[in-house]
Image: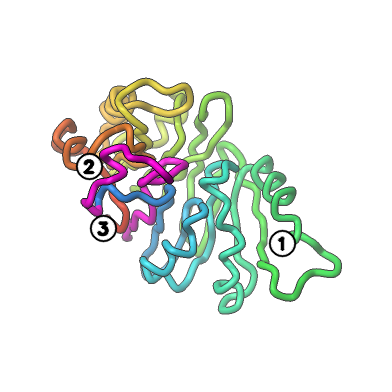
Amino acid sequence: MKIYFLGTGTSQGIPVIGSNHPVCLSEDLKDKRLRVSVWVHSDDFSFVIDCGPDFRQQMLTSKCSKIDAILFTHEHADHTAGLDDIRPFNFKQGALSVYGHKRVIKNLEQRFGYIFETENRYPGAPSVNTIQVVENEVFTINNVDVIPINAFHGSLQVFGYKIQDFVYLTDVKTISKQEINKIINCKVLVINCLREEKHNTHFNLQEALDFISLVQPEKAYITHISHLFGFHEAIQQKLPNNVYVAYDNLEISI
C-alpha cells in the first residue's frame, strides 16, 4: 500500500495570497503546500481522503487515473470544494462513491445541488453515489475494511480513517480514549499539526507530539501545516526520530 500526500497545507495553503511572510516567500518546494488531502492506493484499491479546492492540480501532479472512493473527514471548504472536478473520473468510471457523515453529505447536497439533482440534470454534471459513515461501524470498499475514527475539530465532529495499518487524522483537537484505542501501535499515523502556538480547533506541536507518544505508531507524519509554523527544515529539526514533516508529493509505502 502506498500513501501519496496530495496536499499538506492548512485552509489558505502556502504561500498565502498576498503574504510577505518569509515562509510564503521560500524557494524550497517543501514549503509550498496545497490544501490537505491524501491518496491511499495499491494494486487493489484507490481511495482519496478529502477533495479540496486544489483537487484538479493534485490529480494531475500525482498522475492518479482511477479512484474507487472519496472519503470525507468533514464539510469545510478546504476539504470538499473540489468536488466538481471529479467529472473526468465519471466519464471513465461512472458515478463515484463518496463517503461521509450524514451531516457532511447533507452539506454537500446544499452546496453542490446540481450534482445531486434527480430531475433535469445538466448532462455534464458530476455523478456520485453517497454512503453514510457511521460512528463505530466498519465499512468495506473493494474488500478493504475502513475503520472510522471519531474526533472533534473544536466542537465539530470529524472522521479520521484507519485503512489496514495506516491511520489518517486531520483537523483534530480532541479525541476520546475509546477512539485512541482503535489506533494504538499502527504502522503509520498522519496527524494534523498547525503550528507551535495553541489553536482553538487544531493540534499544535506539543499536542500532536503528546498524541503521537500516546498512540506509539512506528512512524508519524504531521500535516495541515500553517506558514506560521516555520520552514520545513526548521520544523523537522524539532521532531523526534520517528516523526516527520509531510510535504506535498511525498509518497511512502507500508
Q: Nearer the viewer, residue 200 or 96?
A: 200
Amino acid type for the residue under numbered disc 3: Ser
Q: Badge 3 is on which residue?
A: 253
Residue 27 lies in the magenta stretch: yes
Between circles 2 and 1, the one closer to the viewer is 2
Q: Quadrant of the C terminus?
A: bottom left
Q: Where is residue 29 shown, x and y percent of the image? A: 25, 54
SS for callout 1 = helix
Q: Is residue 214 visible?
A: no
Q: Which numbered circle lies on residue 232?
A: 2
Cα–Cα gap, marks 2 and 1: 38 Å
Q: Nearer the viewer, residue 42 or 210?
A: 210
Q: Badge 1 is on which residue?
A: 115
Colour setup of the view: rainbow
Q: Earlier in the sequence, mark 2 or mark 1?
A: 1
Residue at image point 18% right, 33% down: 239
Q: Where is residue 80 shown, x and y percent of the image? A: 57, 50
SS for callout 2 = helix
Amino acid type for the residue under numbered disc 1: Ile
Cα–Cα gap, marks 1 and 3: 34 Å
Residue 30's place in the image compared with 177, above or below, is below
Q: Which residues are magenta?
A: 1-29
Q: Residues within 10 Å of mark 3 (few under 14, many from 20)?
A: few
Choose top left, top right, bottom left or bottom right for residue 182: top left
Residue at image point 66% right, 63% down: 128
The answer to whether the residues at label 2 and label 3 have Cβ atoms under 8 Å apart is no
